[in-house]
C-alpha cells in the first residue's frame, strides 16, 4: 500500500479529491441558487407562455439570433419568439429586438425593442409604427420600404429593420418550406 | 492582542490596495462608483475569508508540490459560489443586479486576484483556522474600505453624486475615465503613505517633536 502511494500519486490524488469535492459542492449550490430564465421581455411583444429552444445554426446577413423560444398563446396558437441583435446601420449601432411570429404562417404577432443602439441622431422611436408591422408576413418585410419606417431617424430605422430581416432569414431557414 | 495586530495589518500596515498595491485591475475598473467598490470589496472579502478557512483546514493535507493548483481550485470554487449568489440575489433585487452587471468580467477574475492567492500562500497555509479567517476578514475590510473611498471620491468629483444620490450639478468627467482612475488612485497611495509615514515616525520618536537641524550660512 505504501509503495502505491508515492509522492506523485499522493499529489494527484489530493488534487482529484479537492476537485471532486468542489464540483459536488458547486452542483448542490447550483440547484439551490438556480434562477429560471425570464421570458417576460417576450411577453412585452406578445402575451404567451414561452420555452427556450436551441438556436439553429443559420447564416444571417443583417444580425444575429441570440435566443429562440417557442410557445403558445391562450387560443392555442403556436408561436416562435426570436431575440435578435441587429447589425447597425451607418451611425446607428446595433439594436436588440424581440420579434414574435406565428409558427405556421410567419405572420408577425408582436415586436419589442429591448435596447436601442446609440446613434448620433435622436431615434424618435415610434411604438405605433412598429405595431403597424403586426399582421405582416415576415416574408414580405422590405427593410428600406418607406412604408416600413419605424423611427424618426433613417439610419436607426434601418438598424431596427435589420432585425426583421434577420428574423425573416432565420424563419425561412428553420420553419420555411 | 493577535487579533488587533491582524486588524492593523489588514486595514493599515499591509493594506492590500494602498500599501501592497495588489488587485489593481479591479480597483481601477470598479472604483467609478462607491457602490461598485463596496460590492467588489464584499465579494473579495467573502472569497478571502472562505478560501483562507478551507486552506487553513487542509494545510497539513495538501502536499507542498501541488499547493498552488490546490489553492487555485479552492479559490475558484468560492468565486463561482459568490458569482452564483450575486446572480441569485440580483434576481430578487435590481440594485444587486446592477452591481453584478457593473462587475462584469472582474467578478470571475477574482480567481487571479493577487490578494487572495498571496494570503493563502503566505498566511493561511501556515496558520491556525481562527487566525486565517481573521486575516482574510481584515484584509478584505482593508481592500473594501480603500476601494469604496476611492469610488466615493471619483463618484463625487466625476458624477456629482454619492452612492447614486445626486449632490450637485458640478461634474468633472475626467474622474470617470481610466486616466482619472489612475490619477485618483495614485493620489490616494501618496496621501496614505504620507500620513502613514508621519505616524510611524512619530511613534518611533516617542511623540517627540521633529526638529530640523540647524544650518549655518556661509
Image: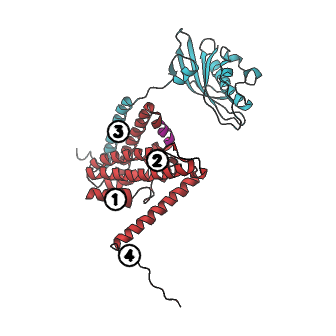
List the single residue furthest toward the right: A146
Q: Mark 1 sits on what residue?
A: B8
For the stretch drawn in magenta, the main secondary structure is: helix
Nearer to us of marks 2 and 3 is: 2
Mark number for residue A22? 3
Element type at mark 3: helix
Q: Which residues are magenta?
A: B97-103
- Tell me if residue A64 comes above or below residue B50 in the rendering: above
Element type at mark 1: helix
* Chain corresponding to cyan in the figure: A
Q: CA distance from mark 1 to mark 2?
A: 21 Å
Q: Nearer the viewer, residue A103 or B31?
A: B31
Chain letter belonging to callout 4 = B
Chain letter belonging to callout 3 = A
Q: Earlier in the sequence, mark 1 or mark 4?
A: 1
Q: Mark 2 sits on what residue?
A: B37
Give the percent coordinates (x, y) of residue B163: 48, 44
Give the percent coordinates (x, y) of residue A50: 51, 18
Nearer to us of marks 2 and 4 is: 4
Chain B, chosen colour in render: red
Q: Earlier in the sequence, mark 1 or mark 2?
A: 1
Amino acid at each position: 500500500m505504501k509503495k502505491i502511494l508515492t509522492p506523485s500519486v499522493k499529489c494527484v490524488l489530493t488534487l482529484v479529491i479537492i476537485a471532486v469535492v468542489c464540483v459536488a459542492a458547486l452542483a448542490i449550490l447550483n440547484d439551490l441558487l438556480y434562477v429560471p430564465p425570464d421570458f417576460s421581455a417576450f411577453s412585452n411583444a406578445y402575451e404567451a407562455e414561452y420555452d427556450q429552444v436551441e438556436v439553429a445554426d443559420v447564416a444571417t446577413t443583417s444580425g444575429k439570433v441570440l435566443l429562440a423560444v417557442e410557445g403558445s398563446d391562450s387560443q392555442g396558437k403556436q408561436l416562435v419568439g426570436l431575440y435578435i441583435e441587429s447589425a447597425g446601420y451607418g451611425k446607428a449601432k446595433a439594436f436588440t429586438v424581440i420579434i414574435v411570429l406565428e409558427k405556421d404562417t410567419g405572420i408577425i404577432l408582436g415586436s419589442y425593442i429591448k435596447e436601442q443602439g446609440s446613434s448620433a441622431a435622436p431615434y424618435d422611436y415610434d411604438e405605433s409604427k412598429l405595431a403597424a408591422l403586426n399582421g405582416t408576413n415576415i416574408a414580405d418585410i422590405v427593410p428600406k420600404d418607406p412604408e416600413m419606417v419605424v423611427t424618426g431617424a433613417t439610419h436607426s430605422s434601418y438598424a431596427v429593420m435589420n432585425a426583421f430581416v434577420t428574423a425573416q432569414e432565420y424563419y425561412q431557414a428553420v420553419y420555411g418550406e | 492582542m493577535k487579533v488587533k495586530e491582524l486588524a492593523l495589518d489588514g486595514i493599515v500596515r499591509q493594506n492590500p490596495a494602498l500599501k501592497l498595491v495588489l488587485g489593481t485591475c479591479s480597483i481601477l475598473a470598479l472604483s467609478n462608483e462607491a457602490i461598485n467598490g463596496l460590492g467588489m470589496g464584499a465579494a473579495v472579502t467573502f472569497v478571502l475569508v472562505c478560501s483562507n478557512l478551507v486552506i487553513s483546514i487542509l494545510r497539513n493535507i495538501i502536499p507542498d508540490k501541488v499547493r498552488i493548483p490546490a489553492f487555485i481550485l479552492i479559490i475558484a470554487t468560492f468565486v463561482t459560489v459568490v458569482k452564483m449568489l450575486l446572480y441569485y440575489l440580483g434576481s430578487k433585487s435590481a440594485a444587486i443586479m446592477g452591481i453584478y452587471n457593473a462587475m462584469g468580467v472582474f467578478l470571475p477574475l477574482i480567481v487571479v486576484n493577487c490578494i487572495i492567492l498571496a494570503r493563502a500562500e503566505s498566511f493561511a497555509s501556515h496558520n491556525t483556522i481562527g487566525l486565517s479567517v481573521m486575516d482574510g476578514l481584515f484584509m478584505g475590510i482593508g481592500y473594501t474600505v480603500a476601494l469604496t473611498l476611492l469610488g466615493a471620491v471619483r463618484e463625487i468629483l466625476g458624477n456629482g453624486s454619492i452612492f447614486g444620490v445626486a449632490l450637485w450639478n458640478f461634474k468633472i468627467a475626467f474622474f470617470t475615465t481610466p486616466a482619472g482612475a489612475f490619477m485618483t488612485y495614485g493620489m490616494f497611495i501618496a496621501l496614505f503613505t504620507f500620513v502613514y509615514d508621519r505616524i510611524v515616525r512619530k511613534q518611533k520618536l516617542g511623540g517627540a517633536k521633529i526638529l530640523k537641524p540647524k544650518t549655518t550660512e556661509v
